[in-house]
Image (cartoon, rainbow, N blue to C red):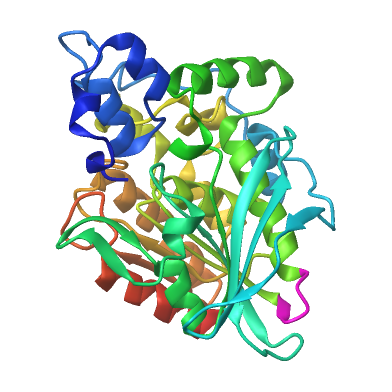
Amino acid sequence: MNPAAFSANSQRIGRREILRTGTLCGAAWLACRSAVPQDTDAGVGPTVPSQLKPAYPVHVEPSRMRRKVRELLGVEKVPPEIVFKAQPTIKTDDGLACTQLTYQNMLGESVPGIILAPMDAVPNSLPGVICMPGTSGTAARLTGPELRRESPGKGALIGWARELSRRGFATLSLTLKGTVSRNPSGYKFWETQARHLAPYGRTLMGVMVDEALRGMRILSGLETVDQRRIGMTGMSLGGNVTWYATACESAIKVSAPVCGGVGSLRRQILEGDRERHSSYFYVPHLLRYFDHPQIVASCVCPRPFLVVAPTQDEDMPRSGVEELMRVVGPAYEAAGQSERFQVLQPESNHTYTVGSFKHVSDWFLKYC
């Protein structure tokens, strides 16, 4: 997500207004935080000792790891059929069928989405992809008519879900719970809700994973979609949800998180910007059982998994990505599927470029 999504005025208003309109995570969360008085050492150095060990660590066998991930996130079994409300399908100028819809997440909240698919497809012929934006994004921006950066050479990449549909995919783009448009009360309500969900064994990350998995049920249930060929991708916040959802659900055939904060949670805590993420990112108790690399090696491998992780991505230090590669690479090699795990590391910060999108598109064309 791009700090430019906030107006210049949002940098100058007072603390009360920031809490009302601020966002939730990533770069946009930083824009909100910068306007609120901070400690003089904010963002400098780790908040916990580097030698700190998890309390009451528990070894989890790889065969039981997916179940434990779902438990930690608070993700229960998703119903096989999801009730949704759809508006009449319209035909776009570029020959796609467009359907706007809404459905409910585990909290009973409304999730907006947009389906795009090639017109006149025959039954069970299309691969499907769930597409999710960053914090400042929406389904409407992902499905815009043109694939481009918001401004020349900068800003969020928009229109990429629609471009996937033009290349032969049925896509369902979601406006996730963690996006600005779904949180008009901003950071204050988001963090309060996180605290109140915790005693129920639920997390905000889990709520968004649930939204993605329910969306997958809807997409795979379409007559023209081959339910055996469902993929998932997202940028930033959507990238986080992508890889956790892939770990939770074996029916996802292929995935590609972009700037999705996957690497090592421990490395991010010790070496990353300590104010970069809101609390959704820090899944309670996770390090007692495993870290990101072990989850991917046990719960995603050997399915095709492309990670777009820019070398200066503020969401995850490079050392965390390197740790992921050291653990996950050998797991794919042992499975005889080394070509199915790739890490693309462009020399940039937290940015989705047209060039990176080409890699993602080619990945889905090859594996989905």
Quarter-wise, where is residue 154 in the image? Answer: bottom left
Q: Quadrant of the N terminus?
A: top left
What is the x, y in percent for residue 149?
25, 62
Q: Residue at x 62, y 35 (%)?
A: 59
Q: Quadrant of the C terminus?
A: bottom right
Counting the numbered discs, the total is 0
Q: Is residue 361 visible?
A: yes
Residue 24 vs residue 46, the one in the foreground: 24
Based on the picture, tell me whether residue 356 belongs to the magenta stretch.
no
Q: Is residue 267 visible?
A: no
Based on the picture, tell me whether residue 226 belongs to the magenta stretch.
yes
Q: Residue at x 62, y 86 (%)?
A: 119
Q: Residue at x 47, y 29 (%)?
A: 282
Q: Residue at x 50, y 31 (%)?
A: 183
Above or below, 21 relative to 98: above
Quarter-wise, where is residue 202 in the image? Answer: top right
- Tell me if 93 is positioned left or right of 128 in this view: left
- Tell me if 71 is positioned left or right of 36 in this view: right
Q: Which residues are magenta?
A: 221-227
Quarter-wise, where is residue 225 in the image? Answer: bottom right
What is the x, y in percent for residue 120?
67, 90
What is the x, y in percent for residue 15?
30, 10
What is the x, y in percent for residue 64?
72, 46
